[in-house]
Image (spheres, rainbow, N blue to C red):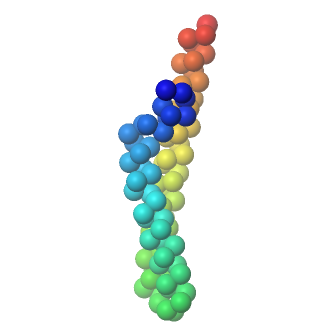
Amino acid sequence: MNEPQKLSADRWLQRLMKMGIPVAVISVLCLWLAWLLQSSALGSVFIITMLIALGLGFTYNIRLVILSLRARKAANLKDN
């Protein structure tokens, strides 16, 4: 298995992706519906889901960078 496949096979990355994508879709739908229906309640739901989606996305990216750095360090140690 090459390096990108190992990283994408990480259990936590998969969980974050499976949670983050639906939350992001719901967030965008709430934004559109809030604009179309002029509903402040849907605007509030958008704000909350947007924050959750951003948090999940940042967590995903931080985890990916940490795993990449660990893999690079392990490859450097193996080469030396």
Q: Is residue 39 above or below residue 29?
A: below
Residue 2 visible in the displayed image: yes
Give the residue displayed 56% in from the left and 11% down from the top: 78
* Residue farthest toward the front in the current orientation of the protein: 1
Residue 36 % position (x, y): 53, 90
Q: Which one is nearer the viewer's eye here, 25 or 47?
A: 25
Give the residue displayed 48% in from the left and 56% down from the top: 55
Q: Is residue 48 above or below residue 32?
A: above
Q: Is residue 62 above or below residue 25?
A: above
Could you say which quadrant of the image residue 9 lies in? top left
Q: Is residue 64 above or below residue 49?
A: above
Residue 29 % position (x, y): 48, 76
Residue 80 % position (x, y): 61, 7
Give the residue displayed 50% in from the left and 85% down from the top: 34
Residue 66 visible in the displayed image: no
* Residue farthest toward the top in the current orientation of the protein: 80
Residue 53 % position (x, y): 48, 61
Residue 50 located left or right of residue 79? left
How many dots with numbers? 0
